[in-house]
Amino acid sequence: MAMAALVTCNHPSLAQGNPAATPPSQTATVTGTTSADASASSSQSAAVPVPAPAIPQLADVFVDGIELRNPDSSRVKLGSGLRYVTDDSLTLFTQYYNETGKEILKLYAGSTVKTKRSFKGYDISKLDKAFLVGGIRRLRTTKRFVTGKGIFLGMNQHEIETILGQPTQTENESDGSTTVRYSLTDAASPFLQYYKSAEYTGAYKFKHCSLVEVQVAFK
């Protein structure tokens, strides 16, 4: 019932040809498979690289050109000298805001120095300066944060489910918001094995028919 209400919202959509809803061209380069680790391949030319599996429909492992679990992709986009902070749960992350100062991207790091750049998750939400934790840097070349599958804040639930398929779970909150969740836990999945994870999760929160937060993580 909540799904039907959201689908009928008169919200600008990609299908309606709204220019503001068109994601940056970076997303056009994502073809549905993970990127190879180019530097590792060149430095170990004798080794046979592990083939990248297809990304399941429900999964979205890229954000703003950065691939989760791929330290080289984060180095190209973010450079060196990342600033890390911790939240109330002592989770280590680095954070950035976009060109307009209206969105914030948090990239959650591994627990050791070796895995810090191998981000295990990301969070996109509206920037509320009152709740900022620690330092934050501006990405001047990013107008809005867009995932590898073209998802960005402001989309509606119908658009998200068209891209990712039917959610694993839907939660309707008392404040009127709706969160759709996606999960993959198949131990035999080549996708999870490639990313050395036991589980993939994605959560998409909507308020007033509009996407206000994206949370993606490997566990």
Image: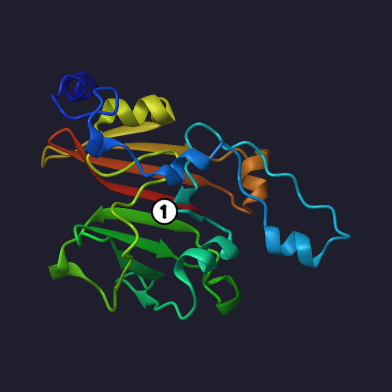
Q: Say left or right for 40 vs 216.
A: right
x 35%, y 55%: residue: 123
Amino acid type at circle 1 is Asp
Pinpoint residue 25: horizontal percent, then vertical percent. 42, 43
Q: Say left or right for 21 vs 10.
A: right
In the depicted structure, whether residue 199 falls above or below residue 181: below
Pinpoint residue 135: horizontal percent, then vertical percent. 29, 78
User: Quadrant of residue 134 in the image?
Assistant: bottom left
Q: Say left or right for 196 vs 12.
A: right
Pinpoint residue 147: horizontal percent, then vertical percent. 41, 46
| Closest to the observer, 75 or 171 | 75
Count the numbered circles shown. 1
> Which residue was labeled with disc 1?
64
In the depicted structure, whether residue 104 falls above or below residue 199: below
Q: Is residue 100 visible?
A: yes
Q: Say left or right for 14 vs 167.
A: left
x 50%, y 47%: residue: 61
User: Quadrant of residue 185 in the image?
Assistant: top right
Q: Can residue 148 be seen in this view?
A: no
Pinpoint residue 140: horizontal percent, then vertical percent. 31, 65
Disc 1: CA contacts within 10 A as few (<14), some (14-19) or many (>=20)? some
In the depicted structure, whether residue 108 falls above or below residue 56: below
| Closest to the observer, 30 or 160 | 30
* Residue farthest to the right, as pictured: 46
- For the N terminus, the quadrant is top left
x 56%, y 36%: residue: 31
x 52%, y 55%: residue: 68
In the depicted structure, whether residue 1 falls above or below residue 123: above
Helix, strand, or loop for circle 1? loop
| Closest to the observer, 218 or 158 | 158
Here the colouring is: rainbow
